[in-house]
Amino acid sequence: NLGVLLSGNKGQGKSLTAKLICKEIPVPTIVINKQIPQRVNFVKFLNNIKQDYILFVDEFEKLFKQNNNTDDKENSYHRQEIFLSFMDGVLTNEHRVLFLLTSNDSVNEFFINRPSRIKFLVEYSELPEELFQLICKDKLKNPLLMEDLEDNVSLINLNIDLLISIIDDINLFNKPFSEFKDIYNYKFEQYKYEIYRLVDSKE
Protein backbone atom coordinates (compact mmCIF):
# COMPACT_ATOMS: atom_id res chain seq x y z
CA ASN A 1 0.00 0.00 0.00
CA LEU A 2 1.13 3.51 -0.71
CA GLY A 3 0.17 6.86 0.82
CA VAL A 4 0.69 10.15 -1.03
CA LEU A 5 -0.11 13.53 0.53
CA LEU A 6 -0.11 16.72 -1.57
CA SER A 7 -0.17 19.60 0.88
CA GLY A 8 0.05 23.39 0.72
CA ASN A 9 -1.55 26.55 -0.54
CA LYS A 10 -4.78 26.64 -2.53
CA GLY A 11 -4.72 26.84 -6.30
CA GLN A 12 -1.23 25.41 -6.76
CA GLY A 13 -2.30 22.37 -8.75
CA LYS A 14 -2.65 19.71 -6.03
CA SER A 15 -6.07 18.48 -7.16
CA LEU A 16 -5.07 18.57 -10.82
CA THR A 17 -1.95 16.53 -10.08
CA ALA A 18 -3.97 14.00 -8.09
CA LYS A 19 -6.53 13.63 -10.89
CA LEU A 20 -3.76 13.07 -13.43
CA ILE A 21 -2.32 10.35 -11.20
CA CYS A 22 -5.74 8.68 -11.02
CA LYS A 23 -6.03 8.85 -14.80
CA GLU A 24 -2.59 7.34 -15.40
CA ILE A 25 -2.88 4.33 -13.08
CA PRO A 26 -5.04 1.56 -14.60
CA VAL A 27 -7.07 0.67 -11.50
CA PRO A 28 -10.46 1.93 -10.27
CA THR A 29 -10.57 5.19 -8.32
CA ILE A 30 -12.89 5.77 -5.37
CA VAL A 31 -13.45 9.45 -4.63
CA ILE A 32 -14.52 10.76 -1.22
CA ASN A 33 -15.83 14.29 -1.72
CA LYS A 34 -18.20 14.74 1.24
CA GLN A 35 -17.98 14.32 5.00
CA ILE A 36 -19.07 10.83 6.07
CA PRO A 37 -21.53 10.52 8.99
CA GLN A 38 -20.37 8.27 11.82
CA ARG A 39 -23.40 6.04 11.33
CA VAL A 40 -21.96 5.01 7.94
CA ASN A 41 -19.37 2.25 8.23
CA PHE A 42 -17.26 3.28 5.26
CA VAL A 43 -14.26 1.31 6.53
CA LYS A 44 -16.22 -1.96 6.29
CA PHE A 45 -17.35 -1.03 2.79
CA LEU A 46 -13.78 -0.34 1.63
CA ASN A 47 -12.40 -3.46 3.32
CA ASN A 48 -14.88 -5.56 1.35
CA ILE A 49 -13.30 -4.45 -1.94
CA LYS A 50 -11.09 -7.33 -3.07
CA GLN A 51 -8.99 -5.67 -5.74
CA ASP A 52 -6.40 -2.92 -6.13
CA TYR A 53 -7.78 0.62 -6.18
CA ILE A 54 -7.02 4.30 -5.58
CA LEU A 55 -8.73 6.10 -2.70
CA PHE A 56 -8.72 9.81 -3.55
CA VAL A 57 -9.71 12.33 -0.86
CA ASP A 58 -9.55 15.96 -2.03
CA GLU A 59 -9.21 18.60 0.73
CA PHE A 60 -8.78 15.85 3.28
CA GLU A 61 -8.58 18.22 6.26
CA LYS A 62 -12.11 19.52 5.51
CA LEU A 63 -13.73 16.12 5.07
CA PHE A 64 -11.97 14.45 8.00
CA LYS A 65 -11.57 16.93 10.85
CA GLN A 66 -9.09 16.57 13.69
CA ASN A 67 -10.37 15.57 17.13
CA ASN A 68 -9.66 18.98 18.65
CA ASN A 69 -12.82 20.35 16.98
CA THR A 70 -15.48 20.91 19.66
CA ASP A 71 -18.36 21.61 17.28
CA ASP A 72 -21.08 19.01 18.07
CA LYS A 73 -22.29 19.04 14.47
CA GLU A 74 -18.79 18.33 13.16
CA ASN A 75 -18.35 15.54 15.71
CA SER A 76 -21.17 13.60 14.04
CA TYR A 77 -18.83 12.87 11.13
CA HIS A 78 -15.84 10.56 10.90
CA ARG A 79 -12.54 12.09 12.03
CA GLN A 80 -8.95 11.76 10.88
CA GLU A 81 -8.30 9.14 13.53
CA ILE A 82 -10.63 6.60 11.90
CA PHE A 83 -8.80 7.15 8.63
CA LEU A 84 -5.49 6.45 10.37
CA SER A 85 -6.86 3.19 11.74
CA PHE A 86 -8.14 2.24 8.30
CA MET A 87 -4.74 2.93 6.70
CA ASP A 88 -3.03 0.75 9.30
CA GLY A 89 -5.58 -2.04 8.89
CA VAL A 90 -5.19 -2.44 5.13
CA LEU A 91 -1.53 -3.38 5.57
CA THR A 92 -2.70 -6.96 6.14
CA ASN A 93 -4.90 -7.08 3.02
CA GLU A 94 -3.84 -8.98 -0.08
CA HIS A 95 -4.94 -6.20 -2.44
CA ARG A 96 -3.14 -2.87 -2.70
CA VAL A 97 -4.51 0.62 -2.04
CA LEU A 98 -3.07 3.94 -3.15
CA PHE A 99 -4.15 6.56 -0.61
CA LEU A 100 -4.09 9.86 -2.48
CA LEU A 101 -4.83 12.86 -0.26
CA THR A 102 -4.71 16.60 -0.85
CA SER A 103 -4.77 19.16 1.94
CA ASN A 104 -4.79 22.97 2.16
CA ASP A 105 -4.17 22.91 5.90
CA SER A 106 -2.37 20.91 8.56
CA VAL A 107 -3.23 17.26 9.12
CA ASN A 108 -2.86 14.97 12.11
CA GLU A 109 0.76 14.77 13.27
CA PHE A 110 0.57 10.99 12.99
CA PHE A 111 0.53 11.31 9.20
CA ILE A 112 3.92 13.03 9.27
CA ASN A 113 7.18 11.08 9.57
CA ARG A 114 5.19 7.86 9.16
CA PRO A 115 6.22 6.35 5.78
CA SER A 116 4.10 3.28 6.53
CA ARG A 117 1.07 5.56 6.18
CA ILE A 118 2.25 8.42 3.95
CA LYS A 119 5.19 7.35 1.82
CA PHE A 120 5.47 10.55 -0.21
CA LEU A 121 4.75 14.10 0.99
CA VAL A 122 4.81 16.91 -1.56
CA GLU A 123 4.42 20.43 -0.17
CA TYR A 124 3.25 23.27 -2.41
CA SER A 125 4.45 26.66 -1.16
CA GLU A 126 4.42 28.69 -4.37
CA LEU A 127 3.59 28.40 -8.06
CA PRO A 128 6.49 26.65 -9.83
CA GLU A 129 8.31 28.84 -12.36
CA GLU A 130 7.96 26.24 -15.12
CA LEU A 131 4.18 26.03 -14.58
CA PHE A 132 3.94 29.83 -14.65
CA GLN A 133 5.77 29.85 -17.99
CA LEU A 134 3.56 27.11 -19.45
CA ILE A 135 0.31 28.86 -18.49
CA CYS A 136 1.51 32.19 -19.87
CA LYS A 137 2.63 30.60 -23.12
CA ASP A 138 -0.74 28.90 -23.49
CA LYS A 139 -3.03 31.76 -22.43
CA LEU A 140 -1.31 35.09 -23.12
CA LYS A 141 -2.30 36.33 -26.58
CA ASN A 142 0.38 39.01 -26.86
CA PRO A 143 3.79 37.53 -25.98
CA LEU A 144 5.27 41.04 -25.88
CA LEU A 145 3.42 41.57 -22.58
CA MET A 146 5.07 38.55 -20.97
CA GLU A 147 8.05 40.36 -19.46
CA ASP A 148 5.83 43.01 -17.89
CA LEU A 149 3.68 40.31 -16.31
CA GLU A 150 6.73 38.54 -14.88
CA ASP A 151 7.92 41.81 -13.34
CA ASN A 152 4.58 42.61 -11.71
CA VAL A 153 3.50 39.38 -10.07
CA SER A 154 5.04 37.21 -7.37
CA LEU A 155 5.06 33.42 -7.36
CA ILE A 156 4.75 33.54 -3.55
CA ASN A 157 1.08 34.47 -3.49
CA LEU A 158 0.06 33.52 -7.01
CA ASN A 159 -2.08 30.50 -7.79
CA ILE A 160 -3.29 29.01 -11.07
CA ASP A 161 -6.80 30.52 -10.96
CA LEU A 162 -5.47 33.99 -10.12
CA LEU A 163 -2.83 33.85 -12.84
CA ILE A 164 -5.41 32.85 -15.46
CA SER A 165 -7.71 35.70 -14.33
CA ILE A 166 -4.89 38.23 -14.67
CA ILE A 167 -3.97 36.92 -18.12
CA ASP A 168 -7.63 37.00 -19.22
CA ASP A 169 -7.82 40.68 -18.28
CA ILE A 170 -4.52 41.49 -19.98
CA ASN A 171 -5.98 39.90 -23.12
CA LEU A 172 -9.27 41.76 -22.66
CA PHE A 173 -7.69 45.21 -22.25
CA ASN A 174 -4.69 44.44 -24.47
CA LYS A 175 -2.58 46.35 -21.98
CA PRO A 176 0.39 45.37 -19.81
CA PHE A 177 -0.54 44.35 -16.27
CA SER A 178 1.58 47.18 -14.82
CA GLU A 179 -0.93 49.71 -16.21
CA PHE A 180 -3.83 48.45 -14.09
CA LYS A 181 -2.25 46.37 -11.31
CA ASP A 182 -2.62 49.18 -8.72
CA ILE A 183 -6.42 48.90 -8.85
CA TYR A 184 -6.47 45.13 -9.40
CA ASN A 185 -7.49 42.82 -6.56
CA TYR A 186 -4.01 41.35 -6.24
CA LYS A 187 -1.22 42.35 -3.88
CA PHE A 188 2.35 41.77 -4.99
CA GLU A 189 4.49 39.95 -2.43
CA GLN A 190 8.24 39.86 -2.67
CA TYR A 191 10.73 37.54 -1.03
CA LYS A 192 12.08 38.95 2.20
CA TYR A 193 15.64 38.22 3.18
CA GLU A 194 17.21 38.80 6.56
CA ILE A 195 20.97 39.28 6.61
CA TYR A 196 22.91 38.56 9.76
CA ARG A 197 26.52 39.56 10.36
CA LEU A 198 28.54 37.09 12.33
CA VAL A 199 30.69 39.04 14.77
CA ASP A 200 33.90 37.61 16.11
CA SER A 201 33.76 37.41 19.90
CA LYS A 202 37.10 39.23 20.06
CA GLU A 203 35.69 42.39 18.48
Image (cartoon, rainbow, N blue to C red):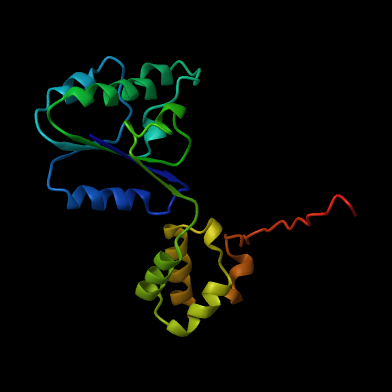
Describe residue 174's horizontal placement relative to residue 50 as left or right: right
Q: Is residue 144 depicted above or below 99 in this figure?
A: below
Describe residue 119's horizontal placement relative to residue 71 as left or right: left
What residue do we see at 41% from left, 72% from top?
Answer: 136
Residue 172 or residue 22, whichever sits in front: 22
Q: Position of residue 150 (x, y in %)?
A: 53, 73
Q: Position of residue 184 (x, y in %)?
A: 58, 64
Q: Position of residue 191 (x, y in %)?
A: 63, 60
Q: Residue furthest front?
A: 202
Quadrant of res 121? top left
Describe residue 36's horizontal placement relative to residue 164 as left or right: left
What residue do we see at 40% from left, 31% from top?
Answer: 111
Q: Is residue 171 depicted above or below 8 in this figure?
A: below
Residue 45 or residue 113, whichever sits in front: 113
Q: Residue furthest bottom?
A: 144
So how many labels did they put on this image?
0
Q: Position of residue 40 (x, y in %)?
A: 24, 18
Q: Is residue 118 something one can see in this rendering? A: yes
What residue do we see at 48% from left, 19% from top?
Answer: 71
Q: Is residue 176 something one can see in this rendering? A: no
Residue 162 or residue 12, whichever sits in front: 12
Q: Is residue 50 depicted above or below 184 in this figure?
A: above
Q: Residue furthest left?
A: 50
Describe residue 16's horizontal placement relative to residue 184 as left or right: left
What residue do we see at 62% from left, 66% from top?
Answer: 183
Quarter of the picture holding the C terminus: bottom right
Quadrant of res 5? top left
Quarter of the picture holding the N terminus: top left
